[in-house]
Amino acid sequence: MKFSLKWLKEFVNVNESPEALADKFNLMSTEVSSVNHLVEVNNLTIGHVKVCEDHPDADKLKVCQVDLGDTIKQIICGAPNVNTDQKVIVALPGAVLPGDFKIKKTKIRGVESDGMICSLDEIGLDHLYGHEDGIHVLPGDAPVGDDPLDYMDLNDDVIDLDLTPNRGDLLSMIGIAYDVKAMLSTQLHIEKPLVVETDDENPVRVTSETEKCPAYHARLIKNVTLKESPYWLKARLIASGIRPINNLVDITNYVMLEYGQPLHAFDANKLNDKNIIVRQAEENEVFVTLDDKERTLKTTDIVVTDDNRPVALAGVMGGQNTEVTETTKSIMLESAIFDPVSVRRTSSRLDLRSESSMRFEKRIDPSRTIEALDRAASLYHALADGEVAEGIASHDKTDKTETPIEISLSEVQSITGYPFKTEDLEEVFERLSFRFENKDGTFTVYAPTRRLDVETKQDLIEEIVRIFGYQAIPVSFPKTPTAGYLTDRQKTRRIIRQTLSVLGLDEVITYSLVSKKEAILFDDEEKSVIKVARPMSEDKSRLRHALLPSMLDVLSYNRARDIDDVLIFEIGSAYFKETEEEHVSGVLRGSYHETKWKDDSVTVDFYVVKGLIEALLERLAIRNVDIKKPDVILRHMHPGISAVIEINGERLGYFGKLHPEFTEEHGIDEDVYVFDLLLDKILAYGKSLDEVEPISKTPAVNRDLAIVIDESITYRELRRTIETMKGLPLDRMDVFDVYTGDNVGDSKKSVALRFWFKRRDKTFSSVEIDRFMEKLIDKVQDSFDAEIRK
């Protein structure tokens, strides 16, 4: 909810700066999204065009002599509508217009220009004020030399509130004024509207045939004149983000912002009957809304009808058949309350969310429905020359009783932990404008209908604390019967997150909602997809089967901004019909490590990703991992540069390079590597993360061995064979060289291995190490027909 600070001051005394008031909202009410000047331009003035002549060297330019009150300046203008005797907005040299456009004295085609005559677009208002072809021409009474922002009532500050769903009261200026009054402990200035009625009786009659419309009020206003709204009204709408249209439309929007009560104006002469009936729509009933679209209705929709013909989709949008146009002379003005659930369902289904429907969804104050109608009627009389017929046609079954809430001083003290006094609570209730009674420390507080969110004593305590001040409540830890702890899954997540971050990857969090195509992008087999009932958009309509599609979007986003090195991971869920899987996935591209001063870098490749995964699994104490070529080509993966990770025949995950055809089709760079691991498998095979082995006091002794074996034998086979040897105190082994070529024979390779031997209770002698190596040599010779290289 955006609101004008100048407008607010008409209802409540405010001496704070916009920034100080925003701080109060953040601490005591609701979060403030932004604080801005309505127009971020200065050094403007009102000028009077005295002379307007053709430029001597340009067909489309005019040389204007503009009176600024204390001086006359020559300004070159290219607007098609500039002319003599116009009052205009002039930006003087030194002004900075939106887009960092600086105004300075210059020459245009050899003729000096000392300023700029502005359009609304050039001062940043065209998108809200309505497009104009050329400069903005002010009325003839505009005072020359004055600030045009003051004249147009645009010299204002705007505060944008980020409202929570329960604070529907802050969707109106009066509601905001009540809250500011409570926060600042100041005075309100809210007057009841006065309506001047004619002697003609209001002929409209209202009936509601549905309980979904508990209140409907209507006034008839005759002989209205359509014209432009005054500047002050336009400025209020612009500050709230609503574009002014004309006085007949602007008045309903203005009152909606002021009271929080949506209104709708019907062209009364287009109504077939003055008997208005509100009912549920018929199944498949057809109705054309104001946007010229034909809507097929359901029985859950509410319609306003005349002579059984729908003329409005209640709470959502009016009908084309009773639209207010330039020929409108009489208006039937509606102020009603419709069921919030019904309005939300209809507006969501038809994609017709609006300022009005949003307010109906958050519930309307029944005590202001008629008052808002009267306020609008008085404005139609003042600004549109309207003649208001006598009386209001009404159907009203709303409960306007204030909600009584009983609460004791001791309850407030016990729950908040603060020693409130009786006077403290009385002051808070007075500031909130809540009527109350106090009997021996027990308060009966009557929550007004404007605060429909205050229903229980818990709501009341929240109001007490926020107005008294959260900072006054002492800080304390919650009392729990047991000490908190992390589950194994939480510990594992934390270790994965820490390890991958230390290894140089950045964590991302992506949407679980994706398009249908992205949901199944990496599926190896056909699986059903879960569809969202009411998605925000088609791109966010399905629950994902893998994290990688969303992460590739993150890669594309960063590459579009010239970020070459992208190393990211995510811990998140994939969703299926019967289960939910938690994955650890990564996307890597570019340099993994780079040293600028040595011009040295390590580019991401298959072995970098393999090393990262091995380091992660080692940190998680997962042993006996098989990394091998997949039996079946993985979808969208390069068939020769990808691998699966298995433990005891179960797949833990996979990694590798994306297929070039896939990257080209999706507009992704080549040489993109990914990995995907199943967290449940990690939990199943990882050791208890609480187990810690003490550091050995004895050193490990290493020996190297070079063997020639068949080229088809893998390091994994060698390692498995050696690790299964009994009586061998092998701490670890690594391969540090592989050679093929001369002196090793065809279809042969030389593999250099390094072994570390260690026991915790002793240090081995050279004789013992030699004996271990002899056993190793015998084993590899027997198992692999290996030849020992000297």
Image (cartoon, rainbow, N blue to C red):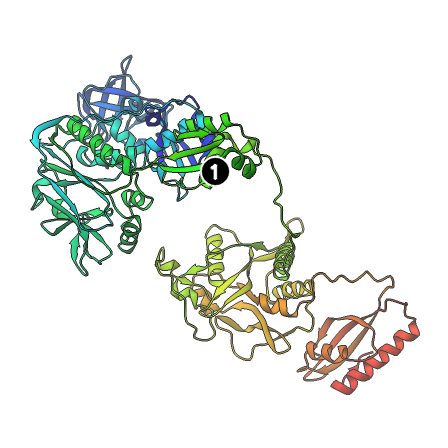
Residue 321 relative to residue 2: left or right: left
- The residue lying toward the viewer, choosing from 172 and 89, is 172
Q: Position of residue 361 (x, y in %)?
A: 32, 46
Quadrant position of the N terminus in the picture: top left
Q: Position of residue 390 (x, y in %)?
A: 11, 31
Quarter where residue 94 is shown: top left
Q: Position of residue 587 (x, y in %)?
A: 54, 61
Residue 559 relative to residue 269: left or right: right
- The residue lying toward the viewer, choosing from 116 and 338, is 338
Q: Is residue 722 visible?
A: yes
Task: Look at mark 1 in the image and give the residue it sits on.
Answer: 462
Quadrant position of the C terminus in the picture: bottom right
Quarter where residue 10 is shown: top left
SS under mark 1: helix
Q: Position of residue 117 (x, y in %)?
A: 27, 26
Q: Residue at x 45, y 40 (%)?
A: 459
Q: Is residue 125 visible?
A: no
